Image: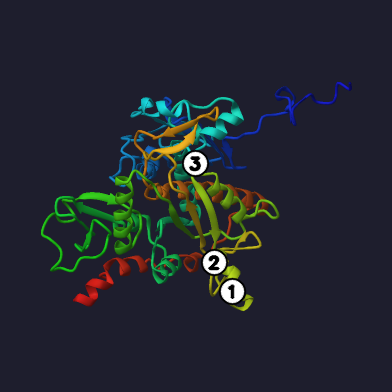
Amino acid sequence: QDSSVPKRVGFCLARSEFPEVAEMSSFGTLFKVSTFGESHGVGVGCIVDGIPANLPLTEEDVQPQLTRRRPGQSSLTTARNESDTVTILSGTERGLTLGTPIAMMVRNQDQRKFDYANTAQAPRPGHADYTYQVKYNMRASSGGGRASARETIGRVAAGAVAEKWLKQEHNTVISCWVSSIMDIDLPADIARALEADPPTREEIDTVGTLAEDEEKDYLIDMHGRKYSRKDGSPLAPEEAPEGKDFASGKKLYTRCPHPPTAARMAARIQQLRAEEDSTGGVCTTVVTGMPVALGEPCFDKLEADIAKAMMSLPATKAFEIGAGYNACRMRGSQNNDLFEPGTDGLLKCKTNHAGGTLGGISSGEPLVFRVGIKPASSISQDQETCTFDGKAHTLSVKGRHDPCVLPRAPPLIEGMTAMTLMDHVLRQRARAGGPCKTLGALGQGEGKATAAFAAEPPKKVQKLA
C-alpha cells in the first residue's frame, strides 16, 4: 500500500494523520481572542491579542460587564454565588495597554461538583453531555465543562476591552436588551421604537429592574407602580396593598426596558422556577456609531460573522438581522431602504429594514439584530431518558440552574458583538490605510424612547385613572 495514503479509522482519518489541530477555542483574525477554563475548574479567562498600545485599561473597565452576567443576581437566575472578580495578568502597565497579549482570569469560587453526580450515568437531555462524550470519548465530570455558560466569562472580558477601544475610536455604542421571554413579547410598537432609538445600558439595567414584596405578593417598578407577582398584571392604586417600596424591595433584574412587560416576564420566570422548569426567549441588539464599510465579501460578510459569533454562544438557536423573517413577507418597494444625503460624503438611509448592512458590508446605519435562546436544559423535573449505554433511566438534575438565562444574556451578546466589530474595523483600516468613517450624529439614537415608555403608566392603570 502507498505509504502516502493516510490510514483510516472507519470513515475518518486516523488522529495522527491530521496535519494540524484547529483553533477551536479562538475567535477573530486581527483581533484574536482565545478562552480557557471549565465551569468547575480553578478558573476561566481569556487571552486577547491585537489590542493597540496605549489604550487606558484596568480591571475597572472590564468588571461592570462581568458583574452584569454573574450568577446569583436575583431570584430570576441561578443561586450559584460567584463574584466573578477579574484579574488582568499581562499586557498592561501603569493602566495602559502595551500592545502585547492581554491575559485575564476569573477564579471559580462556588463549585458544587456533587450536584452533578447523577449525570455521570445519563446525559442531560438537551445538553452537550452526550455529544462531547461521543466526540472526545471524554468530558468534564461536572458543570458542563466548556459547554457551560461560565466559558463566556472570557468572551465578556475580551468584549469589554474591544468596546472601550470602539467607543474611543468611533463612539460606537452597543445596547442589548431582553425583548421576549417564552410567549411574552414587548408590544410591537414599543419594540420598533426601541430599535429605532435604543436604550442605553444604564436604562436597560434601571428601567428593567423590579422590586418584589413577597409578603404582600406584588412587584413594583422604579416609578412606584405595582404589579401582581402571579402573572405580572398591573394593579390599580386601590388594588395594590401597602408594603415595601422600590428601594426596600428585593431586586429582580429582567433587562427588559419596559416595566409592564418586565413584570410579566419576572412573574413567568418565578412560576417556572416553582415548577422546576425553564424557558427561553429573544434578545435584541442595536449598535450605533457604526463604522462604514465593515465586512469582507463573500464569506466574511459582517452579518455572517455576527451570526457566527452569536450562534457560538451557549443555548443560542436563532439569529435574524434587520427586518429578518418579516422581510420575506414584504414587497421590494416596501423593503428597500431609500437613500438620502448623509455627512462626510456618505449617504444615509431613510429606513433601516436591512439592519445596517448592504451586501454584507456595513452602511453606517445602526446594526440591528435579534438572537433566540432556548430554555436551559438542566431542570429538576424527572425526565424519562436513558443512560450512556442505552438503559432506561429517570433523570432529575440537581443543583443551581437558571430557569431562564435571558436576564444574564445581554453582556454575552454585547461582548461577542464588540469582538466581531473590532476585528472587522482593524481589517478595514488595514485595507484602507486609515480610519473608518461613520455617519456621526446621524448614526446615533436620540435617547428619548426608553424614558418616555418607562414613565408611561400601564394601559390598565391609565383607563382606571
Instruction: Look at mark 1 in the image and give the residue it sits on.
Output: 330
Amino acid under disc 2: Ala
Looking at the picture, tell me which residue is in the foreground, 331 or 414. Answer: 331
| Protein image colouring | rainbow
Q: Position of residue 57 (x, y in %)?
A: 42, 40
Q: Position of residue 383 (x, y in %)?
A: 43, 39
Q: Residues within 10 Å of mark 3 (few under 14, many from 20)?
A: few
Instruction: Look at mark 3 in the image and give the residue it sits on.
Output: 126
Q: Residue furthest left?
A: 242
Q: Residue at x 23, y 61 (%)?
A: 227
> Which of marks 2 and 3 precedes in the sequence?
3
- The Cα–Cα distance between marks 1 and 2, rounded to whole angstroms, is 10 Å
Amino acid under disc 3: Gly
In the picture, measured across the screen, residue 400 lies left or right of residue 350, that is left
Instruction: Look at mark 2 in the image and give the residue it sits on.
Output: 323
Amino acid under disc 1: Met
Q: Are the residues tagged 1 and 2 within 8 Å (C-beta)? A: yes
* On-image quarter of the N terminus: top right
